[in-house]
């Protein structure tokens, strides 16, 4: 293992994050606060408790997931796309590093950034609502798995993308809608039965449900199923990354 | 001494069937400076890209420092520094960080003293805290070289290093190449500029249409292929080449004041003695004579033209 290289890539990616610290943290904090004001206060005051939890608190896990998933995806995809775009990818290819080390550096950094943002949002949320986390260990585990798997997912998009439009296409058209429709702001049980069935085909439902269980002990789907879903997604991403590694897809001619 | 870079049947065929490099056997000795000449698209960059890991070979083998570039790529690549043709740098990074990053990628521990030395050699020390996008084109090229030297490579590939570079930088670069050579670094450079190959290379290879047409010691090449011209200036102009000299391949200048005689230095006899004797027999008084050897450029143009024909 070339750990020096992993460290170099990781530090480089983190430096990019801290160079734009204002945007990196301010925008998720600002948008979360807006969600609290709009959903929590304005709408929440008209909604009774959901599954025994105040509406303001109920949306916290979903809000964190929303940010973590989009941040992990966009950070990782941009991280590997940018060197391809400006040509500095030559350096990665000519260095004594293997693909696994490259992935570890980029995905590790993107997951770290997403995790930091998730924690900042959690901290921001405590300013608006009373929060207790029933299963802190499970919460951290769900958070870490989500950061990691969506960073891998983003890495794949970054390798696949040929231009900036493609780079933004998936996060914008797939991830965000799935998260919004995945029960970030409501319980699945609040939907009509037909829509509930449709919703179960949305993989994000399982992630948000499991994460919410870690907070409040209630969930839309069994926790084991949630765990299975995130593990499955992680394995799928790893398999695709492995295939990219084997074929040199869109990085090496 | 075993070659530090050796290729056996190394070849590249792109997906669309383009044969970018025909099977190539090449040995590059440790410590030598090899210049690869050839027009655009000749296959120079493809060759370098394969040796450095940017492009996968379609066939054949290559070893750097005795390590196969595919199966033992870590050992092979650790020996290599690459300065690419295009300027590719992260615009918002600082010079110092950019160079340190490359050293890290090559698996080496941080060594500020070494990086300082590299930056000073390349006159980048004052710019170490500048962001890349604040630098001029020439400075950016220096940064690319600094990155390539950050991990003490034993083999340095310079792909068109002086394309669009000012005189100062070109001279600095030649000095740098001379320094590196003293340290025993092997240097492979591709270039369009014949004068560059002529000035710094030990051996010259000419590539065209993915094929190595020629590979020779520069001096030997120039002597072997070098045709010389003997220019004879006459004291009094003549109207035509005197009949007694018709046996020689002579060219008379328009003003009738000089004759040019082309000969091959490798020929059995150059015919100069006989020519001079015949000149005096014809009663021509000479003002001056001088000889001129054809440059590498002329040799190169002849070769590539012959290949294209």
Image (cartoon, rainbow, N blue to C red):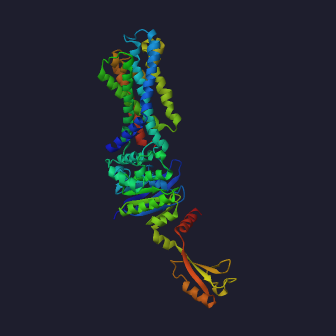
Q: Residue at x 45, y 24 (%)?
A: A30
Give residue B92's position: percent from left, percent from top.
45, 42
The residue most toward the right is B239
Location of residue A139 by image quarter: top left
Specify the farthest residue to the front: B126
Left or right of B191: which side holds B288? Answer: right
Image quadrant occupied by the N terminus of chain B: bottom left
x, y percent for residue B110: 32, 47
Camera-nearest residue between A224 and B39: B39
- Comparing A18 with B240, the one in front is A18
Quadrant where the image shows the C terminus of chain B? bottom right
Please say whether residue A87 is visible from this viewpoint: no
Total label count? 0
* Res B233 → quadrant: bottom right
Please name whichever residue, B3 or B175, is drawn nearer the observer in this view of the structure.
B175
Q: How far across and how far down the image is residue B86, in percent?
A: 49, 50
Q: Where is residue B97 in the image (x, y as percent from the top left)?
A: 39, 45
User: In the figure, A145 relative to B139: above or below?
Assistant: above
Asked if B33 appears above or below B233 in the picture, the reply is: above
Which quadrant of the view contains residue B298? bottom right
Identify which residue is drawn at 38% across, 50% down: B70
Comparing B39 with B146, the one in front is: B146
- Vertical position of residue A215 compared to residue B75: above or below: above
The reply to whether residue B46 is in sight is yes
């Amino acid at each position: 293992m070339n750990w020096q290289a992993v460290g170099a890539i990781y530090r480089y990616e983190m430096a990019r994050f801290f160079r734009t610290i204002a945007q990196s943290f301010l925008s998720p904090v600002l948008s979360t606060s807006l969600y609290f004001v709009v959903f929590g206060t304005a709408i929440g005051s008209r909604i009774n408790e959901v599954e025994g939890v105040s509406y303001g608190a109920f949306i916290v896990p979903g809000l964190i997931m929303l940010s973590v998933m989009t941040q992990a995806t966009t950070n990782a995809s941009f991280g590997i796309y940018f060197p391809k775009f400006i040509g500095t990818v030559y350096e990665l290819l000519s260095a004594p590093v293997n693909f696994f080390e490259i992935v570890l550096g980029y995905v590790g950094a993107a997951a770290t950034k997403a995790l930091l943002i998730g924690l900042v949002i959690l901290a921001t949320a405590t300013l608006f609502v009373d929060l207790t986390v029933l299963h802190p260990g499970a919460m951290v585990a769900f958070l870490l798995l989500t950061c990691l798997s969506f960073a891998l997912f983003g890495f794949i998009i970054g390798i696949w993308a040929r231009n900036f439009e493609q780079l933004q296409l998936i996060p914008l058209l797939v991830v965000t809608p799935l998260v919004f429709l995945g029960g970030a702001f409501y319980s699945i049980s609040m939907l009509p039965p037909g829509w509930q069935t449709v919703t179960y085909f949305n993989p994000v439902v399982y992630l948000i449900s499991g994460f919410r269980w870690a907070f409040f002990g209630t969930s839309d789907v069994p926790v084991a199923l949630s765990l299975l879903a995130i593990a499955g997604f992680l394995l799928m991403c790893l398999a695709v990354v492995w295939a990219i590694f084997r074929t040199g897809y869109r990085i090496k001619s | 001494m075993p070659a530090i870079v050796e290729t056996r049947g190394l070849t590249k065929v792109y997906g669309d069937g383009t044969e970018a490099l025909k099977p190539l056997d090449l040995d590059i000795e440790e410590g030598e400076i090899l210049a690869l000449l050839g027009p655009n698209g000749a296959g120079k960059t493809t060759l370098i890209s394969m040796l450095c890991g940017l492009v996968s070979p379609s066939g054949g083998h290559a070893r750097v420092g005795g390590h196969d570039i595919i199966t033992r790529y870590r050992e092979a690549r650790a020996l290599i520094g690459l300065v690419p043709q295009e300027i590719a740098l992260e615009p918002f990074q600082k010079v110092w960080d950019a160079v340190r990053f490359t050293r890290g990628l090559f698996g080496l521990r941080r060594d500020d003293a070494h990086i300082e030395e590299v930056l000073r050699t390349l006159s980048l020390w004052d710019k170490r805290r500048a962001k890349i996008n604040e630098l001029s084109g020439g400075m950016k090229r220096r940064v690319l070289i600094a990155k390539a030297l950050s991990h003490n490579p034993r083999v340095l590939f310079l792909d068109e290093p002086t394309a669009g570079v000012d005189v100062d930088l070109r001279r600095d670069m030649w000095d740098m190449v001379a320094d590196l050579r003293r340290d025993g670094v092997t240097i492979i450079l591709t270039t369009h500029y014949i004068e560059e190959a002529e000035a710094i290379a030990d051996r010259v290879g000419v590539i065209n249409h993915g094929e190595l047409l020629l590979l020779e010691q520069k001096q030997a090449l120039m002597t072997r292929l070098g045709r010389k011209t003997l220019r004879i200036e006459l004291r009094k102009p003549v109207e035509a080449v005197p009949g007694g000299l018709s046996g020689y391949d002579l060219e008379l200048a328009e003003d009738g004041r000089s004759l040019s005689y082309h000969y091959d230095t490798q020929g059995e006899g150059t015919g100069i003695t006989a020519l001079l004797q015949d000149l005096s027999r014809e009663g021509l008084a000479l003002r001056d004579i001088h000889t001129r050897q054809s440059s590498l450029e002329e040799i190169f143009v002849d070769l590539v033209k012959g290949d294209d024909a």
